Amino acid sequence: MGAFSDLLLIAAEEAEHAEIHAGDGGWWADTAGIMLILPFVAYLLIIFFGKRLKYQGGEFAVGALAINLLWATVLFVMNMTGGVLDQTTFEIARIGSDLVFELGWVVDGLSIMMYFLVNFVGLLVFIYALGYMEGDVRVANFFASFSIFAGAMLVLVGAPNLIQLIVGWEGVGLASYLLIGHYWEDMDNVKAGNKAFMTNKVADVGLILGAILLGLAIGDFDFGHLSEAAVAGNVELNAVALTGGFLLFFGAMGKSAQFPLHIWLPDAMAGPTPVSALMHAATMVTAGIYLMARVFPLFQNMAQDARPWMIAIGAITLFAIGLLALVANDIKKVLAYSTVSQLGYMMTAVAAGGYTAGLFHLFTHAFFKALLFLGAGSVIHAVHSNDMKDMGGLRKYMPTTYWTFIVGSLALAGIFPLAGFWSKDEILATLGHEGYTTVMWIAIAGAFVTAFYMTRAVALTFFGEYKGHGKPHESGKLMARPLIGLAIPSIFVGVLNIPGVDWPGIGNFTEWLGVRVVAMGDYHPESVDFGLAAVGLAAALLGIVVGWMIWGADRKTQEERDSFAVPVLYPLLRQKYYIDHAALGIVGATTGPLARFVDWTNTYIIDGIVNGVGALTRGLGTFVYGILDQRGVDGIFNGLSAVADSAGSGLRKLQTGRIQQYAASFVAGAIVLAVVFVLVS
Amino acid sequence: MLVNQFLILAAALFSLGVYGLLVRRNIVLILLSVELMLNAVNINLVAFESMIRSADATGQIFTIFIITVAAAEVGIGLAIVLMIFRNRRSADVSDLNLMRW
Amino acid sequence: MEWFDTWGLTLIVFLPLAGALLLGLLPRDNEDALKGTALVVTLAAFGLSLLMITQYDFGGGSYNTYQFEVNETWIGAINSNYHIGVDGISLPLLVLSTFVMVLSVIYSWNHWEEPYNPKGFLILMLILATGMNGTFVALDLVLFFIFFEVVLLPMYFMIGIWGDRTPRKIPGFSREIETRLYASIKFFLFTLFGSAFMLLGFLALYFRSGEFGDRTFDIIQLTELGGMGAFTGTFAFLVFGAMFLGFAVKVPMWPLHTWLPDAHTAAPTVGSVLLAAILLKLGSYAFIRISIPILPEEAASWAPAIAILAVIGIIYGSLACLAQTDMKRLIAFSSVGHMGFVMLGIATMTDIGINAAIIGMVAHGLITGLLFFLAGSMSHRYHTREMARLGGNMKLMPIMGGILAFTAMASLGLPGLAGFWGEFMALVGSYNPLDGLPLGVFRTSMVLGAIGTVLTAGYMLYMLQKVNLGEPKEEWLDKEFHDVDRFEMTAWVPLIILIVIIGFYPRIVFESTTDTVVSLVDTVFGSEITASLNSGG
């Protein structure tokens, strides 16, 4: 039966990089698979025993992730200090000699980072959810599905091969479907879940076909072998590398919500807020980026031709979709569009060759975007509405939420010295260095937009007078503490990867991520480019300043506050900051309509095509069934049997049931035969 | 050896049987007519056998065979008639149209 | 265990038949005794098949060698023998068959359709079991044919007597007809039509084999002859075509599938389950056991056509599903799509593809069987299968809803559950089909098949949305619903567990099949055939 095979991968050496020093992680790496299993154990426990407990089984989910976090942290620290490179696999099927399927877990820089991220952010979000979901209709179901998610996500990031990645990939998709449709009594939520699942399923076609192409070219599905073959210039792999690369990228576009497959993500906000925080912001949607990073050597060494397309998609996503956040009134949708935009940054970076830059942004983004979502959830919990029209002035009522939300917003906007500043700057530097200057400027403009809409969200939510009903209050400790727990890393994790800075004893993020089977050969800046950093920072600050000018002031209603699209008539016209006003006019006249146009396109054209294809398929189904099948194919067979039927009804009149008539014809027949015999002889 | 007398007897008997089969209404009588026809055949068989005198007496053996079969047939036939009579209170074949499609 | 080597297989096949005879002797009123006997008999057959797994030598899996073989003269005049045996291909299907039979008996404990009569129903089930088990182990064409046809009658009566009585207007007929009558006749005629041609094919092989020695119906000998290239040219083409008709109806392949939705919709629950779980596999199994090894060259030249039909079936079945309003009919049409993947796997003529087909059959048996159990139980409670009237099932019967959601996910091929492997590996296989087969056709098939998985997801979500989610309709609000009872649970939980286990550890199926399939492909499609294919086209 199942033979466990331990495989220590030998670190390869590449000319431009130093040798990768790594240990095998010892006992902790050998048992790291427990992280992939514990959430599923928690799932079973919740299903069978959850309802009897105080938090309806949330305890099990939190417990599983807490134990997981122990492993993740130990591995993370080991990787910081010495590097860990290990892979444990377990054969689940073998077809002849040419095809082997394995499950297992890989422990290297990339997966350790993800283990840590998923378990750390996950644990905080789970704890938060204990408070947030209290009194919900189906707490046990919620935690069960959430545990499936955590397990599937860990299966995904721990995958040593494409097959296990697909298992995890669709597993998180399933969890996403279940949780978006958590309130399934409302058909809108069900449809949002269906939309998410279907969009992802379309993209999965790319992933599955890509996996087949690449896997058959190198003889198995192992990521390590794929990387080695890409670096070694395997001829068979080279032949399919571009097609396979595109197909994998198409899969990543779905999960990571890249234009034009991003449409599911805003709708996915129908799920409970902790779900949005953990899945649709921090971890699950980054799976596409993770995949691109996992197969990075393929794009680096063979499928370079795919890169301009990937960068173009990423650039459109980061800018055009980011603009949409300006017109959203649902605070979660603002954050959702923002997530899409940030995923665009990551995709652009990874596609441009910035392995570290993209992943570092993934790492920092997870903390501050989860923080923002949890903050938004805290607000929603307090005012019982998602709509920013019902908010305002909450900083007085909810100080913890307010301060942590500010931290998250500043980090997202990329303000020095918070996490987002460092990671975004590294992306800009990478784009500049690799020669994608236009895209770099788009990214800088994107930084402006990011700051701009976050200012709007903060102003409309926390400043001015409260516009909603009732008296909002700060959330309880279970919800407030995770906010603080995420705010701290949102401030500090950026310093882990200051270009050119090696922290004594642990090095930096770039080195940790570089612990892979083959050296990544990516570009990462060796020193801070102060000029570029200043530009990026300036764009973000400008966004905040302009945003604050538009939305800072309070009005009687939020609609009035939020009516910046009518540009020229603001009192600021007569103010001495004439230049400010000009900027305002340009911004108001361009970004507003542009954002609305993009929103319109999003709603009417892209969504329209999706719905149209759905309706068309449905119609085609009706046609195939109704006309072709029922009247055509089936008609032929029914026609045949109708002929037999009518022939039968004619003939059966002969059958009278009178025995003596039968006997008479029998005798008559006998006589005729006798006569014939006599005559013939 | 003359067989004509036997054949004529058998033919007469057979024709009587056919007549009875076709015109009688009572099932029991129809069954009896069938028996008549079978016995006519038996007479023929014995007559021809006595003329040919085959080594293994095929004619007689077949006669015995037919008698056995006839007995079984009457057994089953009468059982059916009895059941029909019990269910229908009649043994008239013209009442029986169960076998119509 | 010497007795087991000689008697084990015969016992597995004929125990159910003996059970049926025993049931015939029991009084019709003593239901517990009837059910108990049926359960004991099916359990015994299942137990024996498990014992067979432990006794089976997994190392000795070269093609055309069978284990637990019995070869006794049967009809000497035509040189037809009672020849049975199992190899790696038939073993999982045999176990599946005995396994599903046990679950069906357990399920039917308290689920009887009108006109009740458990005695008759159980007897038919047991006869069916003998037919199905026998088909999977028969190594003689006459024996195979008989078992293949034995299956037909019980199923015909199940549908015709216990089936759905709603009158239905059939296009082309003047009168309205009860669904069960229409469906049972359609099922019977369709299958019989196919088997008539199949029998012709068998006879042709028998007579032609006389040219190379004694005439024979023996599959092993015919395989050897076929491997030496005995059957070629127009003769082989016609024989393959005749057998193709017979098997394709049973699979069913597009466009011979139209009996299936009707039969499934009309059949009683257990009938649908057995039909989906095992009967459909007889056809695809016969392709692997008979058509390919005996007529390899023809199989290779028919392969592109089979692949095209399979893909049409996948797309067509999925589209038809989207148009359904009847839940059971939707599940029935989904079988057309899933069996399309099985046939696509077979059409690749590679070890990967054929392995995919076998695990696809096993998975489809478990998953679709479970789906039909669920559909049956739900229509027991709602007395309707119209999806427009259902909805909010999760609220009325949460456990049932949960199991339905799980099974739907398994059916759409979610990785990590059993359904994934068949679909995925069929696609893998069709990327690299047997050398010499047209790559364009197969790679297009691969892409279309992959698109088919999206459609599959579409209709499964559509069904879940209609049946499970949303608020329950007014008409159900004041009714009391009993969630899954213990008999249903006992019948379903093993299926659920197996679906998960095969999903994560498909080796429990492949361990048995892979060696046999690899050696089948190696011996049958040796270098000669590939060479002739290459030169020919």
Image: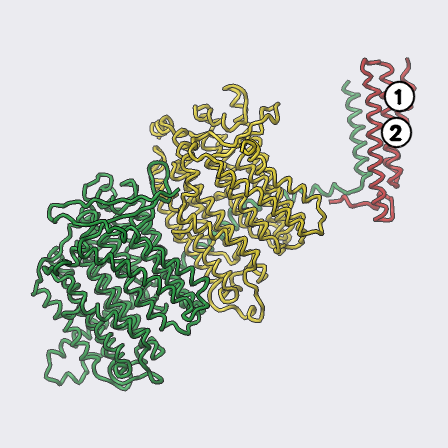
Q: Is residue A203 visible?
A: no
Residue A76 left/right relative to B2:
left
Query: Which residue occupies the foreground of this view, C507 or C397?
Result: C507
Where residue C416 appears, as percent x and y from the top left, is 39, 51
Query: Which residue occupies the foreground of this view, C218 or A191?
Result: C218
Kindly identify which chain the residue marked by label 1 belongs to: B
Q: Amino acid at mark 1?
A: Leu
Chain B shade in the render: red
Chain C shade in the render: yellow
Residue B15's label in the rendered image is 2
Q: Quadrant of the N terminus of chain B?
A: top right
Q: Amino acid at mark 2?
A: Ser
Label 1: few (<14), some or many (≥20) within 10 Å? Answer: some
Label 2: few (<14), some or many (≥20) within 10 Å? Answer: some
Q: Which residue carries the number 1 mark?
A: B7
Chain A shade in the render: green
- From mark 2 to mark 1, how far is it between C-alphas? 12 Å
Which quadrant of the view contains residue A258?
A: bottom left
Q: Quadrant of the C terminus of chain B?
A: top right
Where residue A37 appears, as percent x and y from the top left, is 36, 55
| Residue at screen point 50% across, 25% down | C221
Kindly identify which chain the residue marked by label 2 belongs to: B
Q: Are marks 2 and 1 in contact (CB under 8 Å)?
A: no
Where residue C460 appears, as percent x and y from the top left, is 45, 56
| A137 relative to A32, above or below | below
How many marks the image carries: the answer is 2
Where residue A531 appears, as percent x and y from the top left, is 7, 65
Farthest residue, direction front: A27
